[in-house]
Image (tube, helix red, strand yellow):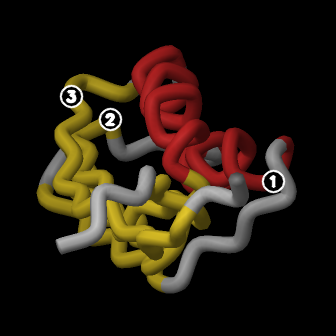
Amino acid sequence: MSHEPWTLTGLHAAVRFNLMADAEPGLLPRLLAPFARRDLTPDSIEARREGDEMQVQIAMAAMPAEMVHLVEGNLRQVVGVRSVTRRQEITGVARRRAA
């Protein structure tokens, strides 16, 4: 059995943000701004209006893991957002460290 040091590289997160927000003009572009500022393009966006609320789901299959909490924080600050929840799975590749 080898005791070589290993490291996890290429850390990404499959992430899905679920938001409840006020149904108002301009909401969707404001929700996409945190992604655009970081040169990220969501894989899917779903929005549904229910009375005076919007349910929005934004998903990425491979967001850089270090950006997840930054984007989530920005989403929480968007005017009209009532709640943000996220589901994520961290992925990466185990590689042997160079000696």
Pointer 2 local density, CA inside 10 Å: few below 14, some 14–19, many at least 20: some
Q: Nearer the viewer, mark 1 or mark 3?
A: 1
Q: Earlier in the sequence, mark 1 or mark 2?
A: 2
Give the Cα separation between the discs numbered 2 and 3.
Answer: 10 Å
Question: Going by the image, does 22 lie left or right of 6?
Answer: left
Q: Earlier in the sequence, mark 2 or mark 3?
A: 2
Q: Secondary structure at mark 3?
A: strand
Q: Residue at x 57, y 46 (%)?
A: 31
- Look at the numbered discs 1 and 2 and tell me whether their residues touch, using CB distance below 8 Å: no
Q: Nearer the viewer, mark 1 or mark 2?
A: 1
Q: Secondary structure at mark 2?
A: strand
Q: Which residue is mark 1?
A: 36
Vertical arrangement, residue 73 with respect to residue 57, above or below: above
Q: Which residue is mark 2?
A: 22
Q: Residue at x 46, y 83 (%)?
A: 44
Using the image as rendered, state which of residue 87 and residue 91 is in the foreground: 91
* Amino acid residing under circle 1: Ala
Q: Residue at x 45, y 29 (%)?
A: 69
Vertical arrangement, residue 74 with respect to residue 19, above or below: above
Q: Which residue is mark 3?
A: 83
Question: Going by the image, does 61 lie left or right of 71?
Answer: left
Q: Residue at x 41, y 22 (%)?
A: 76
- Look at the numbered discs 2 and 3 and tell me whether their residues touch, using CB distance below 8 Å: no
* Amino acid residing under circle 2: Asp
Vertical arrangement, residue 84 with respect to residue 2, above or below: above
